[in-house]
Image (cartoon, rainbow, N blue to C red):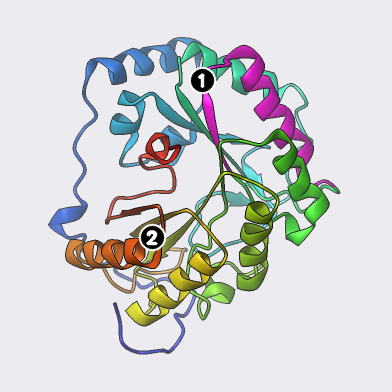
């Protein structure tokens, strides 16, 4: 972690820092992975695992887990870390819930992770499609458990209530970074609003809540621990900590490649704080080991 408290500038560096050895990824292998790979290719199914070039795709598919992005591929927000296109989204595809549910069934997914772009252009923030997708998966693949990685819905709780009503096994909302860097990293988001949504989910009876923070954006270790404590205070159950990697030169630069030893230390601190699960490592992403967080 860096020691300075000055904010990162949003422009990229001319030369990207060389990735350390510990960020090298093994090619996916295994019979289960090959089976899912074959189904994805045959039926032209879409997962964010592929389009997001997730380093853990082989491991997750091998465990019967996959992540699906709903509500299109154009976001109304322009976060400095994210490679999803920003602009005016297309109209809602009301057949999408059934399409996603069919993919889950065809891929024989045990645990489905759903995520979406932000749809601030919609009065419901996309919450109706969210709820219908959960219900469609339950109809077509009743043994599949689910995690919903939701946006903040601008803090409009009547939209959050639609997620609560369908009661997914896990509801996740990522803080992404520490309080000081939120405005630069998530320009249209608010740190306290995200905390409020997470606390509200728990207060309304969601069994498992979850959040994630990227490291390497210029935060200090003390700031990370402070953010972790605020998540514990909001009664969040599961925390993921992973290395930020710059998608393109136009995105925020990597300020630091955080060592595996630091990730291990933060995991121990998190467990001592009271999180039920902490996934912490350079290659950890939001849905890593998602199926293990149900118990």
Quadrant of image for the C terminus: top left
At 28% from the left edge and 72% from the top edge, which residue is drawn? 256
Quadrant of image for the N terminus: bottom left
246 left or right of 31? Answer: right
Q: What range of the chain is rendered magenta?
A: 124-148
Q: Is residue 233 in the magenta section?
A: no
At 34% from the left edge and 69% from the top edge, which residue is drawn? 216
At 21% from the left edge and 24% from the top edge, which residue is drawn? 29
Whether residue 160 is visible, yes or no, is yes
Where residue 286 sits: x, y (%)? Answer: 44, 48
* Viewer-side residue, 53 vs 97: 97
Query: Disc 2 designates what residue?
Result: 246
* Viewer-side residue, 3 vs 19: 3
Where residue 169 sits: x, y (%)? Answer: 56, 36
Q: Could you classify mark 2 by the number of other residues whose Cα lies within 10 Å: few (under 14), some (14-19), or many (20 or more)?
A: many
Query: Disc 1 designates what residue?
Result: 45
In the image, residue 130 sits, relative to residue 256, either above or below, namely: above
In the image, residue 190 sits, relative to residue 159, either above or below, namely: below
Residue 57 quadrant: top left
In the image, residue 260 sits, relative to residue 144, either above or below, namely: below
Dot 1: element: loop
């Amino acid at each position: 972690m860096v020691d300075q408290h000055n904010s990162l500038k949003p422009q990229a560096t001319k030369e990207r820092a060389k990735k350390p050895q510990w960020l090298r990824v093994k090619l996916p292998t295994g019979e289960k992975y090959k089976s899912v790979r074959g189904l994805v290719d045959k039926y032209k199914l879409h997962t964010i695992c592929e389009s997001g070039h997730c380093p853990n795709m082989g491991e997750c598919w091998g465990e019967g887990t996959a992540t699906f992005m709903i509500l299109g591929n154009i976001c109304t927000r322009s976060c400095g870390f994210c490679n999803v296109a920003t602009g005016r989204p297309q109209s809602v595809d009301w057949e999408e819930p059934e399409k996603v549910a069919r993919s889950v069934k065809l891929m024989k997914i045990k645990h489905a992770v759903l995520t979406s772009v932000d749809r601030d252009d919609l009065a419901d923030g996309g919450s109706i499609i969210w709820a219908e997708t959960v219900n469609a998966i339950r109809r077509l693949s009743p043994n599949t458990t689910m995690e919903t990685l939701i946006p903040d819905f601008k803090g409009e709780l009547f939209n959050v209530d639609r997620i609560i009503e369908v009661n997914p096994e896990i509801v996740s909302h990522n803080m992404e970074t520490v309080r000081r860097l939120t405005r630069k990293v998530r320009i249209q988001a608010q740190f306290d609003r995200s905390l409020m949504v997470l606390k509200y989910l728990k207060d309304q009876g969601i069994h498992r809540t979850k959040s994630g923070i990227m490291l390497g954006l210029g935060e200090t270790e003390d700031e990370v621990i402070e953010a972790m404590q605020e998540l514990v205070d909001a009664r969040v159950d599961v925390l993921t900590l992973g290395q930020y990697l710059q998608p393109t030169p136009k995105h925020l630069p990597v300020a630091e490649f955080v060592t595996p030893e630091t990730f291990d230390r933060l995991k121990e601190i998190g467990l001592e704080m009271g999180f039920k699960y902490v996934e912490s490592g350079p290659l950890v992403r939001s849905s890593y080991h998602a199926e293990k967080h149900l118990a």
